[in-house]
Image (cartoon, rainbow, N blue to C red):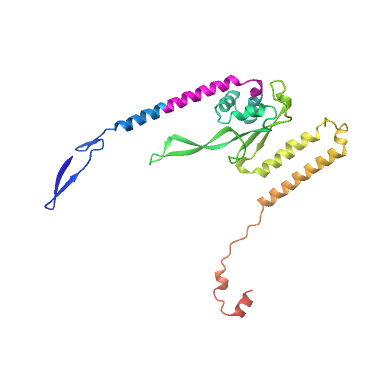
Amino acid sequence: TERKYHRHGESLKTRSTELGSAVTGSSLTTVLPASVFKSIVLSSESRKELAKQAKITKEERRAQIDGRHRYLISRLADGIDLSEQQVEEIIISDDKFQLIEQFFAPSGLKKLLFFYQDVLQKSNASLRPDGSTNNLPQKKLFITMGSTEDFTGTCAFFLRTSDEVVTASNVSQEVNFGMFDCTDGNILQGLEFFLSQIMIPALKSQQNWGAVEEGLKNSQIQEFLYAVDKFVSTLSSSRQNIEDKIQLTKVDIDIYVRNLQNPSDYITAG
């Protein structure tokens, strides 16, 4: 489209290339190029296909759930105060679902970890003026290896007691469950509470110590329990030292050195 404009008696010729927009007065009609329209259609189709595949994967995983999974689900639901249906949906939707199968396998993973904590979630419902979305923290339960995400909430863990394959009939004997609270990232306090309030009382009330017939009367068992007590005491002292650490006040030294002129002034100031 070529137009002529006259400004201060001069003729200004401009040439504009039509890029899919037709301007008439104050109205603007946008015409998408065929390639862009095709890309949008393909993107929409891709999302639908991904959603379809995700649904198929979830149903395949749901079909795999047996007594072993039910045991894990019930422990998690009891410990985290979620319904078993909620936990099941979370597990079959998790990208690390295969870790559960690796945990059940003979000589498989020794531990299976779940974090339950605030995770930033994108919310389309709360848009900023510039069109971007707000990231809102929401409680989320997810499977983790424990080395890629920061631990700021609650950790639910399952530990294996042997290398035997975990089955529906032996899962309650082969797998131990526990929880570790680290609210606000206070790991030392969470560990101290777990050991002093849960593990040590459980150990001291233990009657069966395997091949050790004397049980708690055995000198090695007593030494072991003493070492655990001492460790918790040291842990508590370390935590308190960190929390009550000395804070040195920042001092403006300029007022002390401003008028120093000769060595005797320095000696006096010292």
Residue at the image point whose x is 16% and y is 47% from the top = 13
* Left or right relative to 89: residue 163: right
Question: Visible in this render: residue 76?
Answer: no
**Which of the 4 quarters of the picture holds residue 46?**
top left
Residue in view at x 61 percent, y 38 percent: 153
In front of the other: 259 or 226: 226
For the N terminus, the quadrant is: top left
- The stretch of residues the image draws in magenta is 46-70
Is 230 inside the magenta-drawn segment? no
**Image x and y of residue 163, in percent:** 72, 29
- Can residue 111 be seen here? The reply is yes
In the displayed structure, 132 sits above or below 158; it is: below
Q: Position of residue 140 (x, y in %)?
A: 56, 33
Q: Quadrant of residue 171?
A: top right
Secondary structure predominantly adopted by residues drawn in magenta: helix
Which residue is at a point 85% across and 35% down the rendered structure image? 216
From the viewer's side, name the closer residue of 70 and 74: 70
| 56 drawn magenta | yes
Image coordinates for residue 170, horizontal then vertical, percent: 72, 23
Farthest-out residue, left: 9
Q: Position of 123 compared to 75: left or right?
A: left
Could you say where residue 68 lies in the image, as x and y percent from the top left? 66, 23
Q: Residue at x 54, y 21 (%)?
A: 59
